[in-house]
Amino acid sequence: MRLFLHRAAIFVGLLLTAASLPAHAQLQVPPVSAAPTNTASAITDPTFRADVQILLDADKRFAAEVLKGGGAVFASWFADDAITFNNKKPVAQGKSAIAAQTIWKPSDYQLIWSPDGARLGTHGEMGITWGHYEGRSHDNQGNPIVTSGRYLTVWEKDNSGHWKVLADASNDGPPESDSCCSIH
């Protein structure tokens, strides 16, 4: 329990750090692509850190594998004691609960995302990534359904040094500009 509370405190601190990002970074919504391309380097970005790039690369591999493998692959990236916070769904606590909520096949639903940034904790054992996501499916009549929004993922290195998802949160994007007066 003590470890969970310590990790929860770190998670809240990371959330607050991400929430303090400049407003212009929070409001820009670039198009989501199936193959994210973040080619930062020390030459193009003086604030570049190789350890942060490793975390961004893990997030990109996560997205690419989920696009191919669906919900079962999504759940496989989570730590055993992970949690998710998703739109209009109860919090899922634990890898088995997350797996029970993520049963989609890539032929029925495509979850595509691209990280916009990352931060690492002081010791490089925990970090966060954030970005934009898009979910694509079809209704009963075959009409396309597209949802989009932002996500924040908290990562932690496991005992073998692999990055695992400790917590994942997403929220739908703002309503379209022409739907100013509708209430959801």
Image (cartoon, rainbow, N blue to C red):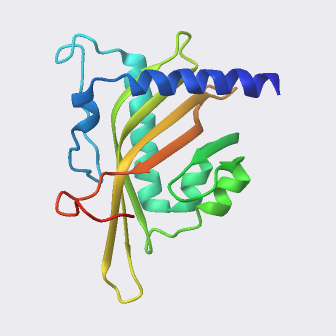
Residue, x 33% and y 51% (percent of image)? Answer: 173
Q: Is residue 84 left or right of residue 69?
A: right
**Looking at the image, residue 107 lies above or below residue 159:** below
Residue, x 24% and y 24% (percent of image)? Answer: 40
Give the image location of residue 95, x and y in percent: 69, 49
Judging depth in this view, the residue of 98 and 181 nearest the camera is 181
Residue, x 16% and y 18% (percent of image)? Answer: 44
Residue, x 46% and y 47% (percent of image)? Answer: 170
Give the image location of residue 65, x and y in percent: 46, 52
Judging depth in this view, the residue of 32 and 8 nearest the camera is 8
On the image, which quarter does residue 137 sit in?
Answer: bottom left
Q: Quadrant of the C terminus?
A: bottom left
**Looking at the image, residue 45 lies above or below residue 5:** above
Q: Is residue 86 left or right of residue 35?
A: right
Give the image location of residue 19, x and y in percent: 41, 27
On the image, which quarter does residue 25 sit in?
Answer: top left
Q: Is residue 136 left or right of residue 96?
A: left
**Looking at the image, residue 158 lies above or below residue 152:** above
